[in-house]
């Protein structure tokens, strides 16, 4: 059995950012990063859209990762009526695969051992020496003083401990990457309605040159009897009939949030493993980077802790830091989510027609709030938090 200071499970944004923070504090640590796939060599299960401010806060951004800069959001009611608004802060469509590959390369240069195509099958309880044993599907084991779990929502590492639970609001998502798409490159496009994506929404995120990421997420309480692939096919046929599909991808998004343990002595969860996704927008890249950074810093502190009392304080400090960063906001959004899913299509249509009457100059979210919050509070709330 091989020993190291820290094992990071998962080479997505959360795990990579955790490794960056951990190794930026100390270059003398022995760190291993393990992932069951080579993430940047397969389709990335998301639309690759991020807000500029959050992205730049979470990580030092390489301009090479940015496909497009977007400044507008087009919000489509079930009737087809469109409300456009501008965001002064703008957003990015990123090349997530390149970003992850570049970050992994940076970790390699810092001496991190990276093993890809190897699955972590379990993480033991902490033993008397203060270490945990990470089991691999190759039959090998690795002993570590700290394990950072960035494995995603369903690996359930830490079974039998208070840190492990099944995702209670896991929603199906399905998307395609297509070209020959007639959609503006300076905007993201959001479609809502019971016939479009019940309990969720459909998206069109441009990739440049007529290409786009087009997909949808359906609410967990609305999936009975629904074939999401057929639903997306109908959406494409109606709205983008000329699109040529290049790649299909299906996945699940942990869309709920509850306050629970995300750190124990020797085991820290981040990203989707910690349910860090925004419950309304289902966005998770920036959230993963932020929680991963906090996890990497907490792991370093845990490696230097003197005794169980100090280690438990580090766990509590990490959970508090995440609540302050995004968690408290996510708790509020999770409570509002069911209400938003029940907004009737007629309300969306009426609101869209009203909002379309705003001045023809650039419509900001502030204007939408000022003129319509009293009449359409749930819809304005949804629009704000879908981005």
Image (tube, grey):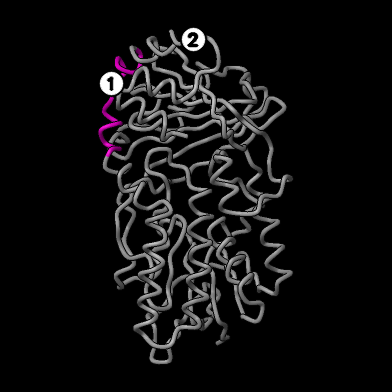
Against 267, residue 224 (above or below) is: above
Q: What residue did someone put label 1 on? A: 374
**Position in image of residue 371 (x %, y %):** 37, 17
Magenta-colored stretch includes residue 338: yes
280 vs 275: above or below: above
Q: Position of residue 8 (x, y in %)?
A: 54, 69
Q: Earlier in the sequence, mark 1 or mark 2?
A: 2
The residue lying toward the viewer, choosing from 210 and 58, is 58
Q: Which residues are magenta?
A: 336-349
Q: Secondary structure at mark 2?
A: loop
Q: Residue at x 43, y 65 (%)?
A: 269
Q: Tell me the quarter of the picture where residue 91 sits.
A: top right
User: Residue visible at 39% across and 14% down?
Assistant: 352
| Mark 2 Cα shell of 10 Å, populated few (<14), some (14-19), many (≥20) | few
Q: Position of residue 239 (x, y in %)?
A: 52, 17
* Residue at the disc numbered 2: 359
Pointer 1: residues within 10 angstroms few (<14), some, or many (20+)? few
Helix, strand or loop for the magenta stretch, by majority? helix
- Out of 8 and 376, give the one closest to the viewer: 376
Residue found at the far bottom of this picture: 129
Q: Residue at x 53, y 48 (%)?
A: 285
Above or below 82: residue 178: below
């Amino acid at each position: 059995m091989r020993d190291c200071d820290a094992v990071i499970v998962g080479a997505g944004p959360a795990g990579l950012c955790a490794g960056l923070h951990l190794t930026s504090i100390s270059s003398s640590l022995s760190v291993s990063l393990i992932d069951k796939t080579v993430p940047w060599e397969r389709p990335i299960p998301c639309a690759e859209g991020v807000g500029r401010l959050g992205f730049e806060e979470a990580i030092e951004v390489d301009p090479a990762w940015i496909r497009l800069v977007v400044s507008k959001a087009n919000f489509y009611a079930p009737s087809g009526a469109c409300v456009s608004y501008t965001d002064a802060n703008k957003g990015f469509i990123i090349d997530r695969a390149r970003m992850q590959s570049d970050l992994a390369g940076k970790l390699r240069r810092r001496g991190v051992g990276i093993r890809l195509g190897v699955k972590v099958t379990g993480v033991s309880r902490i033993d008397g020496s203060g270490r945990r044993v990470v089991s691999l599907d190759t039959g090998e084991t690795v002993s570590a003083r700290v394990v950072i779990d960035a494995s995603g929502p369903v690996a359930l590492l830490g079974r039998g401990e208070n840190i492990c639970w099944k995702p209670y609001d896991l929603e199906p998502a399905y998307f395609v990457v297509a070209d020959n798409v007639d959609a503006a490159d300076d905007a993201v496009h959001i479609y809502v309605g019971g016939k479009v994506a019940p309990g969720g929404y459909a998206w069109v995120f441009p990739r440049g040159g007529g290409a786009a990421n087009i997909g949808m997420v359906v609410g967990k309480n609305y999936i009975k009897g629904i074939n999401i692939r057929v639903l997306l096919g109908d959406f494409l046929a109606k709205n983008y009939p000329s699109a040529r599909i290049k790649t299909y991808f299906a996945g699940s998004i942990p869309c709920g949030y509850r306050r629970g343990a995300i750190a124990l002595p020797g085991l820290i969860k981040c990203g989707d493993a910690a349910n860090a996704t925004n419950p309304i927008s289902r966005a998770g890249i920036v959230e993963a980077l932020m929680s991963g950074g906090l996890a990497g810093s907490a792991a370093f502190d845990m490696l230097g802790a003197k005794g169980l009392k100090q280690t438990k304080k580090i766990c509590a400090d990490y959970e508090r830091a995440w609540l302050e960063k995004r968690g408290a906001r996510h708790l509020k959004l999770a409570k509002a989510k069911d209400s938003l899913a029940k907004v009737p299509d007629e309300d969306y249509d009426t609101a869209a027609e009203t909002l379309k009457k705003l001045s023809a100059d650039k419509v900001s979210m502030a204007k939408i709030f000022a003129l319509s919050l009293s009449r359409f509070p749930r819809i304005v709330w949804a629009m704000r938090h879908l981005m």
